[in-house]
Amino acid sequence: QLQASGGGLVQTGGSLTLSCAASGLTFSTYVMGWFRQAPGKEREFVASISRSGDTTVYADSVKGRVTIFRDNAKNTAYLRMPSLRPEDTAVYYCAATRPLGPTPSRYRYQYNFWGQGTQVTVSS
């Protein structure tokens, strides 16, 4: 089970750090990913991180603006977003998958477990 939290309402330029707490799975053996879905749009990839945390992948739309990291001792993955824009408004989902290649996956269909989502709203 994955439990996402940390969303909220912020102004442009504001910051949020999302958390994804895992239970019922051996967290350190799973690749973790963050996805988001804006109203009327498909769910899209944001970032992913390898089991050890030493490899990360980012969508071009957020590269350089967000950071994914994890704490395997706490069974938790995070997404730090320090400079939010209105276009970042969406429901953010965390997800877990077994490693399928040399880099953590960016493909939604490869993720087996999903959290319930946390709303991020950025006002202009």
Image (cartoon, grey):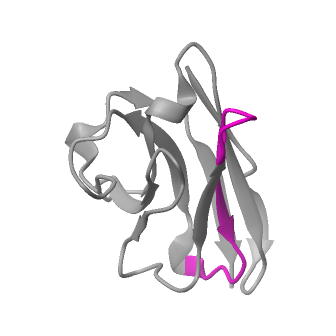
Q: Is the residue 94 above or below the residue 35 in the image?
A: above
Image coords of residue 104 (percent x, y): 34, 54
Instruction: Indicate yes or no whether the magenta region holds residue 72.
Output: yes
Task: Work out whether residue 109 or residue 23 is closer to the camera in this orientation and state it.
Answer: 23
The C terminus lies in quadrant: bottom right
Query: In this image, 102 relative to 18: left or right?
Result: left
Q: Is residue 43 above or below residue 58?
A: above
Q: Residue at x 27, y 46 (%)?
A: 108
Span highlighted in magenta in the image: 71-86
**Residue displayed at 51% across by 43% down:** 94
Residue 71 at x, y percent in the picture: 69, 45
Closer to the camera in the image, 34 or 88: 34
Residue drawn where x is 54% and y is 55% of the image? 53
Q: Quadrant of residue 113?
A: top left
Q: Is residue 14 left or right of residue 84?
A: right
Res 109 quadrant in image: top left
Place of residue 75 in the rendered image (x, y in percent of width and height, measured from the top left): 67, 32
Q: Is 19 displayed left or right of 56 in the figure?
A: right
Q: Please name whichever residue, 27 or 120, is drawn nearer the observer in this view of the structure.
A: 27
Judge whether residue 115 can be spotted in this image.
no
Residue 27, x across and y down, in percent: 55, 29
Magenta-colored stretch includes residue 96: no
Residue at the top extreme?
A: 24
Q: Quadrant of the N terminus?
A: top right
User: Does residue 46 appear in the picture of this structure?
Assistant: yes
Nearer-the-camera pick, 72 or 93: 72
Marks counted in the figure total 0
